[in-house]
Image (tube, coloured by chain):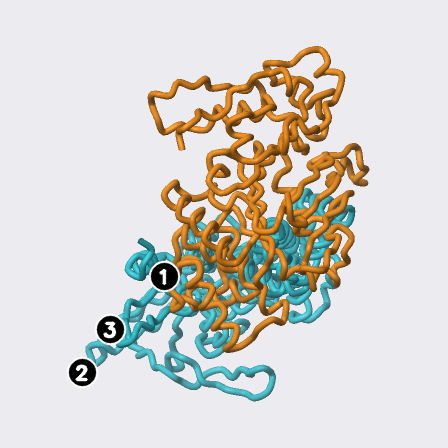
Amino acid sequence: MNAQPILKVEGLKKYFPVEKGFLRRVVGQVKAVDDVSLEIAPGETLGLVGESGSGKTTVGRCILRALKPTQGSIQFQIAEDRTVDMAQLSDRELRVVRPQANMIFQDPFYSLDPRWTILDIVGEPLKLANLAKGKELEDRVAYLMEVVGLEAKHLRRYPHAFSGGQRQRIGVARALATNPRLIVADEPVSALDVSTQAQILNLLQDLQREFGLSYLFIAHDLSVVEHISDRVAVMYVGKIVEVAKRDQLFFFPKHPYTEALLSAVPTPDPDVEKERIILPGEIANPANPPSGCYFHPRCRYAEAICRDEEPVLREVSPGQWTSCHFAEELSLAGAPQGTN
Amino acid sequence: MEGPEKTTALAPELLSRENGDDSVEYMSRGKLIWRRFWRHRLARLGLPVLFALYMMAIFSDFVAPYRPDSRLKGFKDAPPSVIHFGVGENRFQPYVYARKRSFHPKTFREIYTEEEDKKYPIHFFVRGETYEILGLFKLDLHLFGVDEGANITLFGTDSVSRDLFSRTVIGALVSLFVGLGGVAISFIFGCLIGGISGYLGGIVDEVIQRIIDLLIAIPTLPLWMVLSAAIPRQWPVAHTYFAITIVLSIVGWTGLARVVRGKLLSLRDLDFVVASRLAGGSDLYIITRHLLPNFASHLIVTLTLAIPGMILGETALSFIGIGMQEPGVSWGVLLQDTMNFGALVHQPWKLIPGVFIIVTILMFNFVGDGLRDAADPYSL
C-alpha cells in the first residue's frame, strides 16, 4: 500500500450481550466481531468473505456506524487532509461525516421503502445532509439514475414497479447520492440472479473508475469477490483468518479455511479435476467459540496445538497475512490456474 | 435489457396512457388501494351492506315506524305482517290487512287472523309518533306507516307488544357504534402502549408484554362481567353505553398493542430504515416518515377486524343481562327475549336481531379481508 489508506480499522470489536430472564441479565457475549483490523487504500476494493454468521456484515455496519462498535478505532479519511475516528464520533458529528460513506444493501426489496418514490429514496441522503432540494435535488437524482443505467423519467415511480436488478441499481444510486469516498457493499449481488449479478458488478467497477470510489465488498462466496476485489480478507467467527492480494489468495491460499472456500467455487471448465472440500459441522457459535484456533473442529489439518493455542495473524509471505499455525508447512490447493 | 418496455410490462398497475411525450400517468396510492379492494368480491358486497346498516342506524328514528317503547295494544307476540300488493288501480301499491286477535281454545296462545275486508295501504313519509333529533328538535316524519286502525310489524312484536322492527332498527345504533367507539379507545391505548413497548424495548417491553399476557389470560366474559357489575344500575342509558364501550376496550387494546409492537420491531431493523439512519435520519424522522406510513395500513386492517369482536362483546353482555338494560335497546337486549325456549318455537321472528348481528359481523370480516388484501399496493 503506497498511499495513505482511506480507511484503517484497528482492533475492531463488536460484542452483543446475551440477555436472559425477566430482568435482562447479561449472561454472555456474542463476539460477532473480535479484533478485526483492515485497511483500504483510495480507489481500492477490499473483498470481505466469510460464511453467514462470520461477522462480515457487522464489520460493515460498524464501519458506517449503523452499529456502535464495542472497541477499536475506525480511521476514516473524510478529506485529503482530514481523518476522523468513526468509532468515537457522536451522533451530531456523524451527521457531518455520513455523506462521505454509504452502503449498498443485500436485499433490493427490503432496502427501498415501498411507500416512497424513487426521487424520495435516492434524494433522501441529499435532503438529510442539506446538500440539495427542490429542482436541484430532482436534477441530481435524475443524473444519478442515468449514471446507474436507469431512465430519469421513472423518478416518480415506486420501487414495486422495478425488477430486482433495477432496484439494486436504485440502491447504488442512493449510495452515490452524496458523492461518498467509501462505499460498503453488503453482499450487493447475492440476492440477484446470475446474469443480473454480472451487470451490477460491472456497474460497480465502472463507477469505481469514474468516481474514484473505495469499496468494502462483502460477500459470502469467493467467486463474486474474484471479479471485483484488489485484495481479499477471509473472516471466520468474527476474526480475519487470512488477507492477501486477490491472486495470491486465490492461487496460493495459506489457511485451510480459505482452501475450503476456494474448493466451493464452481469451475466453468469440466475437464479441470478438483477436490471439493466439505467442511464438517457448522460455523462455530460466536457466543461460545472453541478453544485455540476457532477453525480446528472443522479443519482436516488440525493437530494438538490447534486445540490449545490461538494462532496470530502474521505475514507469511509478502502482503499475505494468515492466522494458522501451519501456514508455512501446509501446501494447500488454490483455485485452478488459468481458468479465468 | 432494462429499457422502458420492460419496466412498463413490470408495472401492471400503471395506466398505460401515454400523453404524447414520454410521461406516463400513474395511479395514486389511494386509487391502487381502491382497485385492489374492489377486486375482492366479498368486500365489494360488505361495504355497501355495512353502509346501509350504519345509515339505517343513524336514521333509525326515521326508519322505524314506531318508537322502541310504544306498545301496540292487543298485539302481544304477533307474527310479522304480511305485505300484499295492489290497491284499486295501482297494482304495486303495498298494503296490509288489519288483524284480529283470538285465542287458541286449549293453549290460550294468541292467534292473529287477517281481516280480508280491511285493506290498509302502506304510506311513505308519513307523520307518526314524534321523536327528538339529538335532543334538539322534534320531528314526526317516518319512512313508512299505515293509517290508524291497523299496524305494520315487519318483524312481529315482542312479549309486551312492541314492534320488533322498530326496536331492531333503533337497537342498531347502540350495537353498531359500540364497535367503533370501543375500537377507537383500544386504538389509542394500543398504539401508545404498543409503541412504547416496541420502541423502548428492554425491561419496559418485557413488563408491558407480561401485563398483556395476564390480561389475555383472563377469560373475557368473567372479566367483562366483573367490570360491568361496577356500572351503577341507575345510570342513564347513555352513560351505561359509554361505560360498556370502555369495558370492552379494556380487553381490546391488548391485541392492538401486540400488533403495533410487532410491526415496529420488524420494521425497525429493515434495510431501508438502516439506510435512512445512515443518511442521517433521526429517530423521530424515521418513525414518522418510514415506520408509520408502512404500518398504517396494517393498523386499519386490524382495527376493522377488531370491530366485530366489540359488537359481539356488547351483544353477549346485554344478552346475559349485564350490558345495556331496558329501557335501552340493543341487539343483545332484544335477544334476551329468545332465552325462553317457548319463544323460539312459537315466535321464531324474535331471532331476527340475531340475523342482523351475524350479517354485520360477516360483512365486517369481508371488508377487513378486502382491506388486508388492498392495504399494501406496494407491498414487498
Q: Position of residue B178 (x, y in %)?
A: 58, 64
Amino acid type, callout 3: Phe
Residue B300 visible in the displayed image:
no
**Chain B, hue in figure:** cyan
Question: What residue lies at 26% left-to-right and 70% top-to-bottom?
Answer: B84
Tell me residue B81's x, y (percent): 36, 67
Residue on which disc 3 sits: B85
Query: Whole-Å distance between the Cαs marked 1 and 3?
Result: 29 Å
In the visual, does B3 lie left or right of A323?
A: left
Tell me the residue at 42%/65% (across/down): A157
- Label annotation for residue B89: 2
Given the image, what chain letter belongs to the residue carrying mark 2? B
Q: Residues within 10 Å of mark 1 (few under 14, many from 20)?
A: some
Q: Which residue is mark 1?
A: B45
Indicate whether B175 appears above or below A12: below
From what the image shows, is residue A56 above or below residue A95? Answer: above
